[in-house]
Amino acid sequence: MKFDILTIFPESIKEYINTSILKIAQDKGLVEINVHNLRDWAKDKHRTTDDTPFGGGPGMVMKVEPIFNALKDLKEENTVVVLTSPKGEKLVQSKLQELSEKDDLHLIIICGRYEGLDQRIHDNLVDYEFSIGDYVLSGGELPALVLVEGVTRLVSGVLGNEESLVDESFNEDKLDYPQYTKPSTFNGWNVPNVLLSGNHKDITNWREQNRGK
């Protein structure tokens, strides 16, 4: 599994991918994550990646040339080009699962910015567009990280206890059940007695009945 992330703010991504689950996955050689500064593919002396929109209007639009040049250099036979976009399909757990099962998958993720991207990018260069919700962010770096982590943690061998994936929230369209740990009583708040009973059948039934609470 390989990820190439295109952004004009690479440092905002590098720190996160070198911690926790993503660092473990890379150290194990299960995934490869590369972060690229899109400005490296801009040909002018100012390394410009955006410009004013034709027809007028507020804000700036990301240019097609740097993205085209970057994809030409980075694409492989098995590449899927992904764009973070408010117009995209809402990202859900089943999509993350689908992507994680493709061992030789190469994802190039383009992080959008400003008022959007030149429409020719959408029309000609992108295979899949996704959104993480109906709200506005300054750019696509956070959605890109959501996709990378969401897929990576499902790759076989990444998590120490893969059984934890089975009961996770959103598997089978259900939320997870409540979890408790020691002490059994704190500040007058008690752990449900059934979880202390040792009766695995009763515990399983209780957890099933309390999913999403």
Image (cartoon, grey):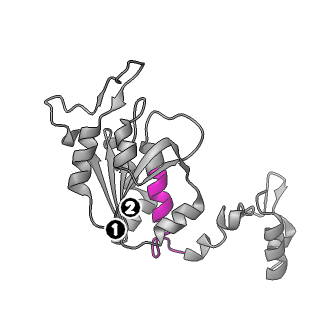
Q: Foreground: 163 or 60?
A: 60
Judging from the image, what secondary structure is the residue with disc 1 in? Answer: helix
Q: Residues within 10 Å of mark 2 (few under 14, many from 20)?
A: some
Q: Position of residue 122 (x, y in %)?
A: 40, 44
Callout 2 secondary element: helix
Amino acid found under the numbered disc labelled 2: Lys
Nearest to the observer: residue 35 or residue 24: 35
For the residues bearing labels 2 and 1, Cβ distance under 8 angstroms: yes
* Residue interval drawn in magenta: 145-161
Type of amino acid under label 1: Asp
Residue 23: give its label.
2
**Farthest residue, direction left:** 45
Q: Residue at x 31, y 43 (%)?
A: 10
How packed is label 1: few (under 14 Cα within 10 Å), some, or many (20 or more)? few
Q: Quadrant of residue 121?
A: top left
Q: Position of residue 22 (x, y in %)?
A: 41, 60
| Residue 146 percent across, percent down from the top left | 49, 52
- Viewer-side residue, 31 vs 195: 31
Q: Which mark is residue 27?
A: 1
Q: Quadrant of the N terminus?
A: bottom left
**Foreground residue among 97 and 145:** 97
Task: Decide if residue 180 is on the left or right side of residue 148.
Answer: right
149 sits to left or right of 23: right
Residue 13 in view of the camera: no
